[in-house]
Image (cartoon, grey):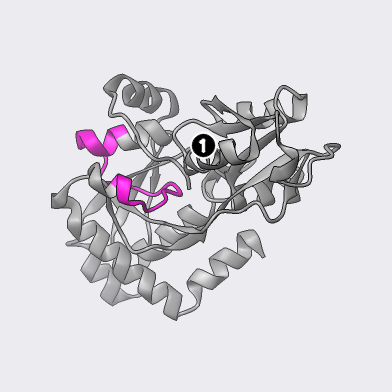
């Protein structure tokens, strides 16, 4: 995805926790053997981002749904553990993990060497994602060559931010950063900037469902990077091991493909 660095600021985390609260989620067993196994299993606190559809977002009834949420639930059921879900936002999720108030996070986090070097510990990749560009519906921009002298919006600290910075001199555009995706999208639609860059599945999904009055520009993608489940403490390694084992099983039994198809077709 997306974000490169998070700062463990307790104030951000606490404010988000207080404002958003926690949604408790559990993965029920499907037979007596799993019930017996679960009785001795641990329950984990898992943090996630907010408003990153189709990976994590709220439906009309206030339920937290999405690809990440369904994958986590399927893996928890397969591995026989339960979890409390903290729907608190990107920075707060990182801070919660770093402070020990959450055991791990699943939030469309791209696996990068920079993150590994700064203390992130990832599972195996569970989704390949690229970043690409979108413009307003009535825009004449057809690609990066049309961006000379124009403004490209990105969300601060994301993979898209890094990608845009890496090519801005080549194509002659200015990078403008925003703290939230909705603000970034609104700037494009309102004409304050000429284009935005974000994770490709996010842009395509929201344009397809009519949530964004924009058009995606094919051919603007970078090389794909995998999303991974993350921890920040070696003592939580068992959670990564369970995630990897469960991911392998749901890939083999078809559940993973079912989840992807449900959201992305």
What secondary structure is marked by label 1?
A: helix
Question: Which residue is rendered at x = 17% and y = 62% of the image?
Answer: 40
Q: Give whichever of 253, 158 is nearer the camera.
A: 158
* Residue 160 visible to the viewer: yes
Q: Give whichever of 160, 40 is nearer the camera.
A: 160
Q: Give whichever of 89, 173 is nearer the camera.
A: 173
Q: Position of residue 166 (x, y in %)?
A: 50, 41
Q: Is residue 154 above or below residue 261?
A: above
Q: Position of residue 3 (x, y in %)?
A: 43, 40
User: Would you name the residue on which mark 1 appears?
Assistant: 165
Q: Quadrant of residue 99?
A: top left
Horizontal placement of 199 versus 20: left or right? right
> Residue most toward the bottom?
252
Q: Is residue 82 above or below residue 156?
A: below
Q: Is residue 138 above or below residue 122?
A: above
Q: Position of residue 4 (x, y in %)?
A: 39, 40
> Residue most toward the left?
235
Question: Which residue is rendered at x = 55% and y = 65% of the image?
Answer: 259
Q: Which residues are magenta?
A: 95-115
């Amino acid at each position: 995805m997306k974000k490169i660095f998070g700062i463990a600021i307790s104030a951000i985390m606490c404010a988000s926790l207080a404002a958003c609260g926690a949604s408790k989620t559990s993965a029920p067993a499907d037979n007596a053997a799993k019930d017996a196994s679960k009785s001795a299993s641990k329950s984990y606190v898992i943090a996630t981002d907010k408003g990153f559809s189709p990976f994590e977002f709220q439906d009309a009834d206030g339920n937290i749904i999405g690809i990440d949420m369904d994958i986590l639930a399927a893996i928890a059921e397969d591995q026989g553990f339960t979890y409390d879900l903290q729907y608190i936002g990107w920075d707060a999720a990182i801070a919660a993990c770093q402070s020990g108030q959450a055991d791990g996070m699943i939030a469309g986090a791209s696996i990068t060497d920079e993150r590994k070097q700064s203390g992130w510990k990832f599972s195996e990749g569970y989704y390949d994602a690229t970043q690409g560009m979108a413009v307003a519906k009535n825009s004449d921009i057809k690609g990066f060559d049309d961006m000379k002298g124009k403004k490209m919006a990105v969300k601060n600290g994301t993979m898209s931010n890094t990608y845009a910075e890496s090519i801005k001199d080549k194509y002659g555009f200015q990078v403008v950063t925003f703290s939230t995706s909705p603000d970034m999208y609104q700037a494009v639609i309102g004409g304050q900037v000429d284009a935005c860059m974000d994770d490709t599945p996010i842009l395509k999904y929201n344009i397809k469902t009519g949530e964004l009055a924009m058009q995606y520009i094919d051919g603007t993608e970078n090389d794909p990077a995998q999303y991974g489940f993350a921890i920040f403490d070696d003592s939580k390694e068992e959670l990564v091991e369970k995630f990897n084992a469960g991911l392998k099983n749901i890939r083999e039994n078809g559940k993973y493909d079912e989840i992807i198809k449900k959201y992305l077709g």
